[in-house]
Image (spheres, helix red, strand yellow):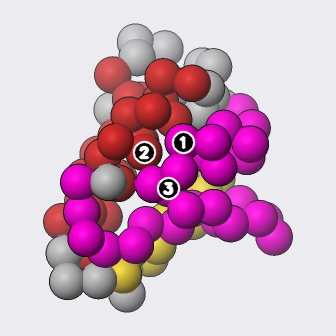
Amino acid sequence: MQTTTVTIRNKLGLHARPSALLSKTANLYASSVTLSCGARSVDAKSILGLMTMAMPCGTQITVMTEGRDEKEAMRHIVELFEERFGESE
């Protein structure tokens, strides 16, 4: 299992477009990808689950990956957060 903490840095938070990109990316991997914020956790492969989390800019999230390609999945997911999901702000 791989675990790390990331911060949402894009201005509008985890809205529809970043949620779709995150879900699409998570679904590229066989490993499970889970995001946790406080007491809430969600399967990152579920766009609806991601959107119900309503995570604004500045939110710290724990990312957990588990499975045969967990390291690659984690690297790719963390990259999305670091690059602000391709948004300029």
**Amino acid type of disc 2?**
Ser
- The picture quadrant where one finds residue 79 is top left
**In the image, farthest residue toward the right:** 39
Residues tagged 3 and 1 counted as in contact (Cβ below 8 A): no
For label 3, the SS is loop
- The picture quadrant where one finds residue 20 is top left
Give 14 or 50, whichever is nearer the viewer: 50
- The picture quadrant where one finds residue 4 is bottom left
Residues tagged 3 and 2 counted as in contact (Cβ below 8 A): yes
Q: CA distance from mark 3 to mark 2?
A: 6 Å
Give the labeled residue for mark 1: 47
**Amino acid type of disc 3?**
Ala
Q: Is residue 43 magenta?
A: yes
Residues tagged 2 and 1 counted as in contact (Cβ below 8 A): yes
Residue at (40% x, 72% y) in the render? 32
For label 1, the SS is helix
The image position of residue 9, as x and y in percent, is 53, 33
**Where are the magenta residues, as a range?**
28-56
Q: Is residue 75 magenta?
A: no
Give the labeled residue for mark 2: 23
Give 42 or 58, whichever is nearer the viewer: 42
Residue at (54% x, 42% y) in the render? 47
Q: Does any portion of residue 66 appear in the rendered image?
A: yes
Give the labeled residue for mark 3: 44
Q: CA distance from mark 3 to mark 1?
A: 7 Å
